[in-house]
Image (cartoon, grey):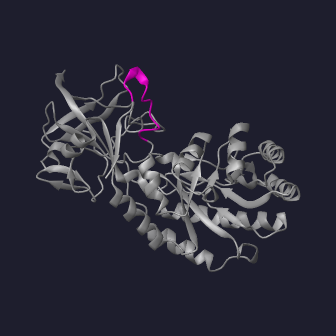
Amino acid sequence: MKPLGPISSSYQTIEGELSVGGRTASALVAEAGGTPLFVYSRDMIRQRVADLRAAMPERLAIHYAVKANPFEPVLLEMAGLVDGFDIASGGELAMVLAAGIDADEVSFAGPGKRDDELEAAIAAGVTLNCESANETRRALRIADKIGQIPRLAIRVNPDFELRGSGMKMGGGAKPFGLDAERVPALARELIAEGADWRGLHIFAGSQALDASALIEAQGNVLDLAARLASEIGTPLPRLNMGGGFGIPYFHGDRPLDLAAVGSALRERFENLPQVLESTAFCIELGRYLVGEAGVYLTRIVDRKDSHGQTFLIVDGGLHHQLAASGNFGTVVRRNYPLAIASHFDAPATEEANVVGCLCTPLDRLADQALLPRAEAGDLVAVFCAGAYGATASPSAFLGQGPAREILV
C-alpha cells in the first residue's frame, strides 16, 4: 500500500458524498454537464486570503500569480481580494486586461519576453520585471518608439536560494533575473534614461513548507534589497519579495506555519534600514492561495483486475492533472490526496490503482491506494487541484481536450 496525501479539512460530506460549496460532487457534475471537471471553492479562496492577511504585516501587499490558475472567474474573484497580479506572458496580460484588472496593479516577469509582449505591456502601463540588460534596453527602445514612459523593475538573481523549495528560482547560474552584482549599474542606467523606476523583484524559490527556510529567505531578500538600493544610490520604491509558500501534497507533509512566517516578517519590518523605510513591499503567491481550493472530479468508466491488482479506470488523467500523475517536477512518484467522491465518508476496504484513460503507462493518479470499494459510474476526486492543473497539463494529448471548470 502507498499512502495518499492529506485532504483539507475544509471539504465536507453531504449524505456520504463529497461536497464543495454546499453542493454534492454529483450535483456539480450535473450542473457542469459532465466529467472531467475542475471545481474551485470561492469560500476556501476567500478564507485563505483572509488568513494570510491576518498573519502578515499590514504594510505587505498580496499579489496573485496568475500562472497558478488563470480561469477567468478565479481572476475576477481575486480582483476583489488581492492588491496586485503577477503575469508571465503576453497571453496572461490579455487575460487580466480582459478581466478588467487595472494595469497599474500588474507586473510582468519571465525570461523570454518578445518585443510584441514588451510593447503591449508598456502601452498598457504594466510594470516590467526586466530579466537581463538586453531586455531592459529593448524595453527602453520600444518605449521611446511608442512615446511611452516604461515602468521598469529589475528581477534579481540572488546569491542564495530558498532551502527545501520544490523549485529553486535563485542562486547560481539561472535564466531568471540579473545576477545581483550587475543590478546597481543597470538600475542607474534605466533611471538616467527616464524610465519610471519601480524597484526590485527577488524570487528565491517555490513550494516550501518549512517556516524557518522561508523566514531565512525573506531575511536574505531584505538584506540584499537594502544593499542594492544603497549601491544604486536611491531609496527603493518597491520590492516584490517573491513567494514560495507551499501546500501539503503528500503523506507526511505538514501545513506551513503561517503565523511564524508573519511574526518574523513583522519584526523585520519594524527594524528596516533607512533605505527601505519608504519601500512598498509585496509577496506574490499562486499555489498557496488557490491550490487547496480546487478539486478534480473524474468518473470511473471501468473496473478491472490484473495479476491480483485492482484498476479503477477513469475518464480523466494526466492530460488534466499532470502533477498528480507524477510527471510534473517530482523525481519519485507519490500519491496526491485522492478519494472516492461518491463514498467520501465510507471506510477504506481495498487497495486499488486509479489510472487515466490515456494510452500510456504514465497515466496514473494513485498507486496501490487504500480506498472504499468503487465501481464504474462512481466519481473520483483528486485534491490540491486548484493550481497548475488545467493549464499546466497537456489537454490536447491524444485529442482528449480540456476539462470543464467551475467556481462555486
Q: Compared with residue 26, is residue 365 higher up or lower down, i.e. above or below?
A: above
**Image quadrant in which you'd find residue 363:** top left
Please name the residue shown 67% across and 67% down the image: 222
**Image quadrant in which you'd find residue 264:** bottom right
Q: What main secondary structure does the magenta stretch of the protein show? A: loop
Q: Which quadrant of the figure contains the N terminus? A: top left
Coordinates of residue 336 in the picture (x, y in percent) = 34, 43
Coordinates of residue 329 in the picture (x, y in percent) = 49, 38
Q: Return the residue nearer the eye: 366 or 93.
A: 93
Q: In the picture provided, is 128 more to the left or to the right than 362?
A: right
Residue 310 showing in the rendered view = no
Q: Return the residue nearer the eye: 301 or 79.
A: 79
Per the image, is 29 magenta?
A: no
Please name the residue shown 78% across and 66% down the image: 229
Q: In the picture provided, is 311 more to the left or to the right than 319?
A: left
Per the image, is 395 magenta?
A: yes
Coordinates of residue 402 in the picture (x, y in percent) = 39, 32
**Outermost bottom residue:** 270
Q: Return the residue nearer the eye: 258 or 331.
A: 258
Residue 85 showing in the rendered view = yes
The magenta stretch is 389-401
Please name the residue shown 74% across and 55% down the image: 152
Q: Compared with residue 91, is residue 155 higher up or lower down, i.e. above or below?
A: below
Coordinates of residue 236 in the picture (x, y in percent) = 74, 67
The number of numbered discs placed on residues in the rendered structure image is 0
